């Protein structure tokens, strides 16, 4: 026998209105899906790209600008991204390689960019994500690029150099690390398993609260959570998505040492998968360069940027592994190559470089 209290006439009437509106929304959404299927047929005939992140951004901005409220713009954007993701799945399902297993921050970044209808391919490492994307097993890949606390993910930088994949987008994700375990207590934890970056980002908390626990690096935070679900004396460090995935308790929330802890993820694909995005006014161009080993060579690289008023937002070096103390430099600059001052600066940089490769041009996350 139901114990639910009887709804008042006013509440019952409002619920009827919501039910009617839901039916109208469902009808309209299916009408939109039918049009999307037709769009997919036209794109197939024309040979054009099915997934166009610039088009997604344009539609969402247009919807937000027309939003009268009371829904907040960020909630409207999230709703429309899922609508467009579901419709795109009818046109052509997008297979996206991510770091697995399910429950990683990489998975979360992919869903934020592609929507929940994307077909995710879980890989054991970022290196495998690159290989899957380069081999065509997935149209796109999502890889960690840098963290605001621990810096760059060096293996991702190396793979950008050695594979044909290009960067076509980025996601900046606020990272909240949680201590996860099968029991709702920190007592008796012998091993903490997580990705090396997560262990480093939580080292002060771990030293204070679990000084005697072994810190065991694994390929991903979700893998650490999976192992914690199998071993009662183990704990993992991961997000709430992983806790739900593996049925774990959140023993301690937000244990990262820095409150403002973000990770930047790159969206990669083969050059033929997606054309270079058009200028948006808030773009980043990533390049790899090397210079002859002579005095002042690195200084000379900066001159064209200053000369043409181009701002550099990142400069990282990686050894060329030639045994001759030579380096590759990974550089992010503000702007798009279609802008004359950026094109001129890049042309002069290329002329100075012994090696030059454009990794991609893409809209800045959150711009």
Image (spheres, rainbow, N blue to C red):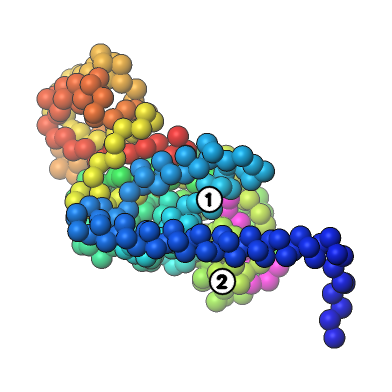
Residue extending furthest bottom?
1
Residue extending furthest top?
307
Q: Nearer the viewer, residue 256 or 88?
A: 88
Which segment did they paint magenta?
A: 176-184
Q: Can the viewer see residue 360?
A: yes
Residue 307: x and y in percent read 25, 13
The residue carrying pointer 1 sits among few (fewer than 14), some (14 to 19) or many (20 or more) residues within 10 Å by Cα, namely: few
Q: Quadrant of the C terminus?
A: top left
**Is residue 267 shown left or right of residue 236?**
left
Disc 1 marks which residue? 78
Question: How many angstroms separate mark 2 from mark 1 (CA)?
Answer: 25 Å
Quadrant of the image occupied by residue 192: bottom right
Element type at mark 1 = helix
For the point 29% across and 40% down, the residue is: 277
For the point 23% across and 45% down, the residue is: 275
Element type at mark 2 = helix
The residue carrying pointer 2 sits among few (fewer than 14), some (14 to 19) or many (20 or more) residues within 10 Å by Cα, namely: many
Of pointers 2 and 1, the one earlier in the residue sequence: 1
Quadrant of the image occupied by residue 72: top right
**Is residue 35 located in the magenta-colored stretch of the structure?**
no
Q: Nearer the viewer, residue 282 or 223?
A: 282
Residue 77: x and y in percent read 52, 46
Q: Quadrant of the N terminus?
A: bottom right
Disc 2 marks which residue? 246
Q: Nearer the viewer, residue 20 or 91?
A: 20
**Is residue 178 located in the magenta-colored stretch of the structure?**
yes
Residue 15: x and y in percent read 74, 63
Q: Nearer the viewer, residue 267 or 198?
A: 267
Q: Can the viewer see residue 179?
A: no
């Amino acid at each position: 026998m139901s114990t639910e209290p009887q709804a008042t006439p006013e509440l019952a009437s409002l619920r009827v209105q919501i039910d009617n509106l839901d039916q109208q929304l469902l009808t309209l959404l299916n009408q939109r899906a039918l049009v999307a299927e037709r769009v997919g047929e036209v794109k197939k005939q024309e040979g054009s790209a099915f997934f166009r992140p610039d088009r997604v951004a344009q539609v969402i901005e247009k919807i937000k600008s027309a939003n009268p409220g009371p829904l907040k713009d960020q909630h409207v954007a999230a709703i429309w991204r899922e609508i467009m993701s579901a419709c795109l799945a009818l046109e052509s399902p997008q297979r996206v390689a991510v770091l697995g297993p399910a429950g990683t921050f990489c998975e979360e970044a992919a869903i934020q960019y592609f929507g929940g209808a994307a077909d995710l391919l879980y890989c054991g490492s970022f290196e495998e994500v690159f290989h899957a994307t380069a081999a065509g097993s997935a149209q796109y890949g999502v890889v960690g690029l840098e963290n605001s606390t621990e810096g760059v993910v060096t293996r991702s930088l190396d793979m950008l150099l050695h594979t044909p994949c290009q960067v076509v987008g980025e996601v900046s994700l606020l990272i909240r690390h949680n201590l996860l375990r099968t029991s709702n207590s920190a007592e008796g934890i012998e091993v903490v398993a997580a990705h090396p970056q997560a262990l480093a980002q939580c080292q002060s908390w771990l030293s204070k609260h679990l000084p005697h626990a072994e810190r065991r690096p694994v390929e991903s935070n979700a893998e650490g959570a999976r192992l914690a679900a199998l071993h009662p004396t183990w704990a993992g460090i991961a997000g709430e998505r992983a806790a739900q995935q593996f049925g774990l308790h959140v023993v301690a929330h937000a244990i990262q040492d820095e409150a403002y802890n973000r990770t930047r993820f790159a969206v990669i694909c083969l050059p033929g998968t997606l054309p270079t995005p058009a200028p948006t006014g808030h773009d980043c161009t990533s390049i790899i360069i090397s210079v002859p080993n002579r005095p002042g060579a690195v200084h000379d690289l900066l001159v064209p940027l200053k000369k043409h008023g181009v701002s550099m937002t990142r400069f990282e070096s990686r050894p060329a592994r030639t045994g001759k103390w030579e380096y590759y430099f990974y550089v992010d600059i503000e702007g798009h190559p279609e802008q004359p001052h950026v094109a001129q600066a890049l042309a002069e940089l290329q002329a100075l470089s012994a090696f030059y490769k454009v990794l991609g041009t893409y809209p800045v996350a959150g711009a």
